[in-house]
């Protein structure tokens, strides 16, 4: 089963491991406030990624759109994909009468970066409407949203941590 799609972009001038280690030493209520604020910011990033899904995108992009969500974490984190079954049911290869639907995580990479542009896949089957856009290593909706938000993400994350520490009078 597909685990989902993971994309990481790090733009920082500090060692994130040290920051996360220090955050682990903060009181739980401070950590929870930071996590709640990060979830709100992650939801903004997820909404931007959803807005980037357009008319020219492959049908798979619309299928994974509901799976793009902000997550409550120490970092600003957005997840896309996962095991949720999406799309039109298709018959199994063994023809035992069972119908399957693709997991959203298996569709994320192709919807984001497009196809090889070939008319057939490796097994010689016609590509049809699968990932109709050509290969784009810059991405179509998730990566551009992250690139737009990246300059603000570190500043927002840093400000959130500092505000919560100052609010509690910690040093």
Image (cartoon, rainbow, N blue to C red):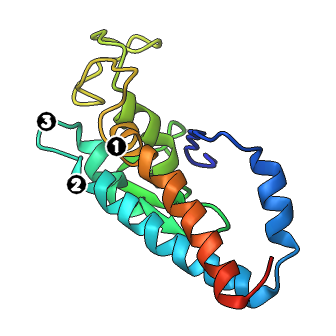
Foreground residue, 64 or 161?
161
Seen in the picture, residue 46 relative to 142 is either above or below; the reply is below
Who comes first in sequence, dot 1 or dot 2?
A: 2
Residue, x 40% and y 20% (percent of image)? 137
* Label 3 to label 1: alpha-carbon separation: 20 Å
Does residue 153 appear in this view? yes
Residue, x 29% and y 30% (percent of image)? 130
Give coordinates of residue 150: x percent, y percent: 45, 45
Residue, x 67% and y 67% (percent of image)? 74
The residue at which mark 2 appears reads as 51
Give coordinates of residue 154: x percent, y percent: 54, 52
Who comes first in sequence, dot 3 or dot 1?
A: 3
> Which numbered circle lies on residue 148?
1
Seen in the picture, residue 54 relative to 79 is either above or below; the reply is above
Residue, x 56% and y 39% (percent of image)? 9
Seen in the picture, residue 32 relative to 67 is either above or below; the reply is below
The quadrant of the rendering that contains the C terminus is bottom right
The residue at which mark 3 appears reads as 56
Asked whether the beta carbons under mark 3 and mark 1 sit within 8 Å of each other, the answer is no
* Mark 1 secondary-structure assignment: helix
Give coordinates of residue 123: x percent, y percent: 46, 13
Foreground residue, 116 or 75?
75
Give neighbour class at mark 1: few <14, some 14-19, many 20+ (Cα, 10 Å). Answer: few
> Which numbered circle lies on residue 124?
none
Question: Left of 3 or right of it: where is 14?
Answer: right
Seen in the picture, residue 25 relative to 15 is either above or below; the reply is below
* Mark 2 secondary-structure assignment: helix
Give neighbour class at mark 2: few <14, some 14-19, many 20+ (Cα, 10 Å). Answer: few
Give coordinates of residue 83: x percent, y percent: 56, 57
């Amino acid at each position: 089963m597909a685990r989902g799609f993971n994309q990481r972009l790090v733009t920082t001038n500090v060692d994130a491991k040290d920051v996360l280690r220090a955050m682990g030493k903060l009181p739980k209520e401070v950590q929870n406030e930071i996590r709640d604020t990060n979830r709100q910011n992650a939801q903004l990033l997820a909404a931007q990624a959803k807005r980037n899904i357009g008319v020219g995108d492959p049908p798979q992009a619309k299928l994974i759109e509901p799976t793009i969500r902000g997550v409550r974490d120490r970092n600003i984190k957005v997840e896309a994909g996962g095991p949720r079954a999406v799309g039109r049911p298709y018959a199994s290869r063994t023809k035992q009468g069972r119908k399957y639907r693709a997991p959203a995580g298996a569709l994320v990479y192709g919807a984001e970066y497009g196809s090889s542009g070939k008319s057939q896949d490796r097994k010689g089957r016609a590509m049809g409407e699968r990932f109709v856009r050509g290969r784009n290593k810059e991405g179509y909706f998730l990566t551009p949203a992250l690139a737009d938000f990246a300059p603000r993400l570190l500043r927002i994350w840093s400000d959130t941590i500092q505000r919560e520490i100052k609010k509690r009078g910690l040093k």
